[in-house]
Amino acid sequence: MTDDSGGRYDLGGCTVTTIRGGSLKLDGGAMFGLIPKPLWARIYPADEQNRITLACNCLLVEWPGRPNRRTIIETGHGPKYNEKEQKIYGIDPANWLLPALVARGIDPASITDVVVSHLHFDHAGGLTHKRDGQLVLTFPQAQVHVQRQEFEDARANFGIMTMTYREENLAPIDEAGQWRLLDGAQEIVPGIRALPTPGHTRGHHSIVIEGEQRAMVFAGDLMPTRHHVGAPYNMGYDLLPLENRESKRRLLSWIAEQEGLLAIDHDVEWPVVAVRPAGEWFEVTPASEDPA
Ligand SMILES: [Zn+2]
């Protein structure tokens, strides 16, 4: 089962399609950090185990003038979970990025570049999967771009979440020599650049896609749902909450100035939004899709 309700956004000479790379459930309290439950539960209902449902939104970026270049941003949770984990996280291992791409007629071998915001399991899990019991690359021809700081922290398991950096998502990329480690703000491929937004992790970056008419920014776990746009809405998982808030303020104000679009990684209903100033902060509204 895959969700094929992806939207298409034309940035000018460059199109972005949202692809649902599965969904998972995480504890609502952990997802909303210091926000009291009576506040968040009103806008985001939890199940009987106090979990909330999160989408794993991924992006496919294409340039009509450059048919040989196709980039995937973020890979979602992937399929490699035992029964216990499937239950804990509410993950359906049949519903992830690869089947969603195949359902759209996209050959994973045609993907030239994959960018991940950070290497937590629900972002990097789709980089690999198992075939006949062996770990294999989901995108056999692609370079995989991530910040060097994030890569080193993943390898050192630096963080407060246990079990989120998983070797099974990383080792096959080592063996294939596909990593491309980034040092701060730099171009990833022409038209896409990395913008460090530390806070959730030290090496977390956002990904800026610049078309001829407008830009879209994929903000990863800087603000995982539209309900995390507000200044105090950090996750309990964030390593550096104050830095996260500052990264969020800087990014939202840049997007609002540009009249750009913001892609939100875990929002179930609004994967792409517009941003505008509101009082001392910002508000978001769903962005309208462009016709295919
Ligand atoms: Zn994360």
Image (cartoon, grey):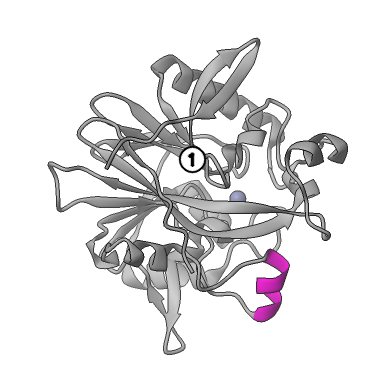
Query: Considering only vertical position in the picture, is 238 above or below 86?
Result: above
| In the foreground, 52 or 123 | 52
| In the foreground, 275 or 3 | 3
Query: Considering only vertical position in the picture, is 284 above or below 204?
Result: above
Amino acid type of the residue that numbered disc 1 sits on in the rendered structure: His
Query: Considering only vertical position in the picture, is 219 above or below 245?
Result: below
Visible residue check, residue 174: no
- Residue at the image position 35 percent from the left and 62 percent from the top: 101
- The stretch drawn in magenta includes residue 219: no
**In the current view of this chain or complex, which residue is farthest to the top?**
279
Pointer 1 residue: 205
Q: On the picture, is 52 further left or further right than 128?
A: right
Would you identify the image quadrant in which residue 179 lies?
Answer: bottom left
Visible residue check, residue 25: yes
How crowded is the residue under tag 1: few (<14 C-alpha within 10 Å), some, or many (20+)?
A: many
Element at label 1: strand
Span colored in magenta: 83-89
- Residue at the image position 40 percent from the left and 63 percent from the top: 100
